[in-house]
Image (cartoon, rainbow, N blue to C red):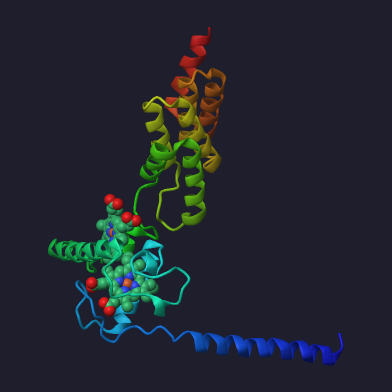
């Protein structure tokens, strides 16, 4: 590339940048946090704008949502086009209720004289941990299963694991899928329970407990050979797994 060509390209890029900056500058005034908010019903009326800003950004992070979840405005549009004063969005009202709940909870905890030097402050994040509806993993899977069936349930698990693993929002140890799969088994859905327990052993390949539950589901579905294999694997992973040992013995005994 010749030097003059490079200079020309650089010049073009620069012109673009200047146009882009000038363009946004002209079209959109910057959003300013109000010095005095007009419609505060829970926060003090004279809340400084820095506190208001910190509180609102805290809400979006704690719940994993953006401003239009609670405020009138279009996702992707500049904040200057939003109506933050309006109470039209029902979630804004729910959020006010939650703010009161948080305050009451902290007042109550303070009265308890917990023998710890520093009181733990309950906040939105304590329960929400980046989700709008704080639920246990087992409860959330049961909800999806009830409305949309097993494929959607497995898809939801995969999505939640990708998005939240390590965030402390859900218990991704073998316990959650075990609890949920066992409930499917109790409700008489052994095939769906097998799907869930298979997922559990894939995700937790060293869990003896997960393999013995998979064995239970195969046994319930009448798939004896697979049940035996699962119990054997459970015992291999943990020779002290007496539950698997007993079930294995009784399955083999039946075959004689
Ligand atoms: C989870 C719901 C929720 C989210 C998300 C949220 N807000 Fe709010 N916002 C509220 C509530 C509730 C109030 C009113 C608080 C009160 O009544 O004390 C409020 C008040 C405001 C006000 C004051 C309006 C006035 O003049 O009365 C502004 C400005 C504001 N929010 C901006 C934002 C911005 C910007 C975002 C995104 C970064 C955001 N909010 C995200 C719930 C939310
Ligand atoms: C003690 C636990 C707890 C705390 C703390 C908490 N929440 Fe919640 N929140 C919940 C639960 C549980 C739900 C689900 C209620 C339901 O759907 O039955 C919920 C639901 C919500 C919803 C409705 C979401 C939806 O999609 O339906 C909003 C909005 C919300 N919370 C905002 C907040 C804000 C803002 C804070 C902090 C000021 C907060 N919450 C603090 C437990 C909590």
Residue at the far left in the pictured view: 111
- Taking the spot 42% from the left edge, 34% from the top edge, the residue there is 181
Q: Residue at x 47, y 84 (%)?
A: 28
Front one among 46 and 184: 46
Observer able to see residue 239: no
Residue at position x 62%, y 90% in the image = 18
Quadrant of the rendered image containing residue 71: bottom left
Q: Residue furthest right?
A: 2
In the rendering, at what x and y percent does residue 172 appear? 45, 47
> Where does the image place residue 64, in percent across and percent down from the top left?
41, 62
- In the depicted view, which residue is nearer to us: 13 or 141? 13
Quarter of the figure that contains the N terminus = bottom right
Which of these two is toward me, 120 or 128? Answer: 128
Location of residue 201 with respect to 91 vertically, above or below: above
As drawn, which residue projects farthest toward the top? 256
Report which quarter residue 116 is drawn in: bottom left
Q: Give coordinates of residue 131: x percent, y percent.
A: 39, 58
State which image quarter holds ligand 2: bottom left
Q: Position of residue 219 (x, y in %)?
A: 48, 21
């Amino acid at each position: 590339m010749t030097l003059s060509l490079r200079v020309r390209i650089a010049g073009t890029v620069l012109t673009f940048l200047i146009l882009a900056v000038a363009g946004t500058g002209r079209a959109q005034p910057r959003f300013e946090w109000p010095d005095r908010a007009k419609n505060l019903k829970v926060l003090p009326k004279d809340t400084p704008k820095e506190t208001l800003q910190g509180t609102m950004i805290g809400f979006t992070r704690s719940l994993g949502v953006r401003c239009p979840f609670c405020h009138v405005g279009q996702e992707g549009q500049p904040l200057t086009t939003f109506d933050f004063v309006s109470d039209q969005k029902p979630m804004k009202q729910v959020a006010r209720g939650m703010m009161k709940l948080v305050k009451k909870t902290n007042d109550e905890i303070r009265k308890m004289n917990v023998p710890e030097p520093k009181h733990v402050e309950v906040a939105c994040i304590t329960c929400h941990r980046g989700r709008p509806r704080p639920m246990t993993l087992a409860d959330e899977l049961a909800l999806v299963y009830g409305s949309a069936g097993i494929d959607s349930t497995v898809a939801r698990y995969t999505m939640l694991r990708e998005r939240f693993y390590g965030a402390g929002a859900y218990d991704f140890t073998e316990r959650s899928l075990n609890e949920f799969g066992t409930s499917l088994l109790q409700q008489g859905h052994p095939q769906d329970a097998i799907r869930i327990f298979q997922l559990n052993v894939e995700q937790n390949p060293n869990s003896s407990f997960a393999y013995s539950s998979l064995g239970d589901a195969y046994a319930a579905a009448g798939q004896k050979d697979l049940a035996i294999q699962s119990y054997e694997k459970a015992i291999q992973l943990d020779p002290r797994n007496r539950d698997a040992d007993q079930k294995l013995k009784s399955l083999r005994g039946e075959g004689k």
